[in-house]
Image (spheres, rainbow, N blue to C red):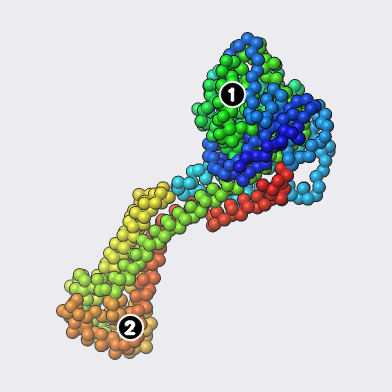
């Protein structure tokens, strides 16, 4: 979509373009510029408004940068300025015009020079108080922006995903833009207009700023990269606004030149008209990353971006990326093509204009400055700089034009928040999905472990080997029945055990049961850890969270497994003791009989029939097993013994489940430690929607779009 073009037949001033629903890149971006106004009292053709942003995403890098030191311009004696026409309907820069907003009613006959109070506090008293509904609209928008800023600031992207790094960068850039520009500018729409002068290395930005204010205020040089702090130049009447630090609050104000990239040098220039200030920004293509980031930060805080390039650098890629983003944001820009050889001025200007047209920037004012000799102070001659100087002079003198520029840029920046925050919300949702996927992989691994244990208790695998041999020994030799007979058997066995050094009857079986269970538990835990580790390793977010020790069970697992089995065995014996408290046989055998019955219950847990195993696995002791079964049923009752076995199995599975949960927590605790919020994407989208609603209601540019 393109902006409305003023009709030259009935308009004498250009109109600042409406903001479109363009989808800007997530990066803080730079401005799109006001069209110059035709000088003189008679009606003249007017400029077309800069085109509306297209629906696109531009992702310029957020750069930190140091101010550029402009090179001295080549000398060409008595060269005259050549000003390129930007469009057929746009007057040349040699005949600058003021800019009028569709949202700002012209004030009729403007004085040539606006009278401003020496202190902005007095200016507040002179500004007409807006109606109550306008105040409430600004308040609602400010509150919505504050909530959005808090939501963006509290949303993290800790998991390593394709979108996480970009989301972190964009989120930081948006918070910075809200703090540096949107909130302070919305609080003071009448504050002086800030023109950020940006461009490529060696484009002559500092020389241009010095020439516009007719005094060396920003040091120019030939060394690259520069390391000094950015320089802000304003009329003395406007110094209080820039010194109090509401705009760009992260930069420390200073009156002296500094090499600190976090400092902002404030310089007073009486020759510069009140209501407008220049900020000499670092190189946007500096080799120093910090310099590029600072440059982008300053450009995002501009009411108007004055882009400076040269005949040798105007086609470089980096500036065009930022210019495109500026267009998408609807920021006001103007361009200076510097140091153009006189014989090539027309050809180069035409080519640059074609490039601007292709990128829908054709309505931006373009000023062409020829190669020229600098004077003794390193300034461009007044006759050469006059078109640009006069254009800014008219802008400074026209409060309506300044207000239009401010509102256009502010509205464009606000509109660009929606698509950028949507990108953040998508990245936040991706984080939530990744966290769930990682959690599911751990859950699946340890759920398999639980199932393996349950299967092992059903399919009789635990009755093989040592356990089966000890069970056959225990049952087949009649020791099981003896343990239930009387205290005589208990006393006899204790005496024999003491003489021979052999374990008491049933002790071998108890040890074998314990060993078999611990072995199974350790194998299950090892398999689950390996499966969970492999699942995370195959996921980009999981791989970044892994440590080598997670590939194996915890170092203390063997001790915890031993303790689990022993505790379970004691619990089973207690269960048998409680169930047989009223049984005379058990009472006579006391603990000895309880041990025998308890071992039988433990064996029952290991079978699918919920009782003592029969069939091929226990064929050697089948007769004794059946006899033992009959004895237990006679003592406890058939249903009671089955209930005991079921309770014992369920308790063992519960204990194993808790042990595996502790092992799984080694993974899930790492996931929880990253601190992901619940539904961060929904919160971001809602906060952005609230801002858009408040922006539309306020209609800064007189339009709801």
How packed mark 1 is, by other alpha carbons closer than 10 Å (few <14, some 14-19, many 20 or more), is many
Determine whether, in the image, residue 517 is placed left or right of residue 269.
Answer: left
Determine whether, in the image, residue 166 is placed left or right of residue 138.
Answer: left
Q: How many marks?
A: 2
Task: Describe the element under mark 2 as helix, strand or loop.
Answer: helix
| Residue at x 72%, y 30% (from the top left corner) | 45
Q: Position of residue 112 (x, y in %)?
A: 81, 26
Reading the image, the residue beneath label 1 is: 349
How packed mark 2 is, by other alpha carbons closer than 10 Å (few <14, some 14-19, many 20 or more), is some
CA gap between label 1 and label 2 equals 97 Å
CB under 8 Å between callouts 1 and 2?
Answer: no
- Labelled disc at residue 642: 2
As rendered, which of 508 and 180 lies closer to the eye? 180
Q: Position of residue 641 (x, y in %)?
A: 32, 84
| Residue at x 54%, y 19% (from the top left corner) | 223
Determine whether, in the image, residue 665 is placed left or right of residue 336.
Answer: left
- Above or below, 699 against 11 in this view is below
- Above or below, 46 against 536 in this view is above
Task: Describe the element under mark 1 as helix, strand or loop.
Answer: helix
Q: Nearer the viewer, mark 1 or mark 2?
A: 1
As rendered, which of 402 and 576 lies closer to the eye? 402
Does the rendering let one see residue 321? yes
Q: Position of residue 310 (x, y in %)?
A: 57, 22
| Residue at x 33%, y 83% (from the top left corner) | 642
Q: Among all residues in the image, which is located at the extreme top?
A: 77
């Amino acid at each position: 979509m393109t902006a409305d073009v003023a009709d030259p037949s009935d308009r004498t001033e250009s109109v600042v373009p409406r903001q479109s629903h363009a989808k800007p890149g997530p990066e803080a971006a730079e401005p799109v510029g006001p069209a110059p106004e035709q000088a003189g009292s008679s009606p003249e053709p007017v400029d077309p408004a800069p085109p509306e942003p297209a629906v696109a995403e531009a992702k310029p890098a957020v750069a930190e940068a140091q101010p550029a030191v402009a090179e001295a311009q080549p000398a060409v004696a008595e060269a005259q300025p050549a000003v390129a026409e930007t469009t057929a309907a746009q007057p040349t820069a040699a005949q600058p015009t003021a800019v009028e907003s569709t949202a700002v009613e012209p004030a009729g006959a403007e004085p040539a020079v606006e009278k401003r109070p020496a202190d902005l506090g007095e200016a507040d008293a002179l500004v007409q108080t807006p109606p109550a509904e306008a105040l409430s609209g600004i308040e609602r928008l400010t509150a919505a922006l504050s909530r959005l800023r808090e939501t963006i600031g509290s949303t993290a992207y800790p998991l390593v995903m394709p979108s996480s790094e970009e989301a972190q960068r964009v989120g930081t850039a948006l918070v910075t833009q809200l703090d540096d520009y949107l909130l302070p500018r919305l609080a003071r729409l009448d504050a002086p207009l800030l023109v950020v002068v940006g461009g490529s290395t060696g484009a002559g930005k500092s020389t241009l700023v010095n020439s516009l204010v007719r005094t060396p205020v920003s040091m120019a040089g030939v060394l690259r990269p520069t390391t000094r702090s950015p320089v802000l130049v304003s009329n003395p009447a406007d110094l209080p606004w820039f010194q109090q630090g509401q705009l760009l609050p992260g930069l420390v104000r200073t009156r002296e030149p500094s090499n600190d990239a976090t400092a902002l040098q404030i310089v007073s220039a009486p020759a510069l008209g009140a209501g407008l200030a220049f900020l000499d920004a670092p190189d946007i293509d500096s080799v120093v990353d910090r310099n590029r980031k600072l440059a982008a930060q300053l450009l995002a805080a501009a009411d108007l971006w004055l882009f400076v390039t040269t005949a040798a650098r105007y086609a470089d890629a980096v500036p065009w990326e930022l210019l495109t983003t500026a267009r998408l944001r609807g920021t006001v820009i103007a361009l200076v093509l510097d140091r153009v050889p006189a014989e090539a001025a027309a050809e180069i200007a035409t080519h640059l204009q074609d490039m601007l047209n292709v990128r829908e920037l054709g309505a931006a004012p373009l000023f062409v400055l020829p190669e020229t000799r600098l004077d003794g102070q390193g300034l461009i001659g007044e006759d050469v700089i006059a078109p640009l100087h006069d254009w800014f002079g008219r802008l400074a003198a026209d409060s309506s034009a300044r207000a239009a520029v401010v509102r256009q840029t502010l509205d464009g920046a606000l509109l660009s928040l929606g698509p950028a925050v949507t990108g953040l919300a998508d990245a936040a949702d991706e984080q939530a999905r990744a966290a769930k996927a990682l959690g599911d992989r751990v859950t699946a691994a340890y759920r398999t472990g639980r199932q393996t244990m349950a299967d092992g208790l059903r399919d009789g695998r635990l009755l093989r080997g040592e356990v089966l041999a000890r069970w056959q020994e225990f049952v087949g030799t009649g020791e099981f029945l003896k343990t239930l007979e009387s205290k005589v058997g208990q006393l006899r066995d204790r005496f024999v055990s003491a003489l021979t050094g052999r374990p008491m009857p049933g002790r071998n079986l108890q040890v074998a049961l314990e060993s078999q269970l611990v072995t199974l538990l350790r194998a299950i835990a090892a398999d689950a850890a390996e499966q969970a580790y492999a699942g995370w390793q195959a996921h980009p977010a999981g791989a970044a969270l892994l440590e080598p020790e997670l590939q194996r069970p915890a170092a203390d697992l063997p001790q915890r497994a031993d303790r689990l089995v022993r505790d379970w065995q004691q619990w089973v014996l207690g269960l048998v003791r409680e169930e047989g408290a009223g049984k005379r046989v058990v009472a006579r055998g006391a603990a000895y009989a309880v041990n025998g019955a308890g071992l039988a219950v433990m064996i029952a847990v290991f079978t699918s029939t919920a009782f003592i195993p029969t069939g091929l696995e226990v064929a050697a002791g089948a007769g004794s097993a059946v006899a033992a079964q009959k004895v237990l049923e006679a003592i406890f009752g058939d249903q009671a013994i089955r209930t005991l076995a079921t309770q014992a199995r369920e308790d063992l599975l519960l204990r194993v489940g808790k042990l595996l949960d502790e092992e799984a927590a080694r993974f899930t605790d790492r996931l929880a430690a990253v601190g992901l919020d619940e539904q961060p994407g929904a919160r971001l989208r809602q906060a952005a929607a609230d801002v858009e609603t408040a922006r539309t209601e306020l209609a800064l540019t007189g339009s709801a779009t």
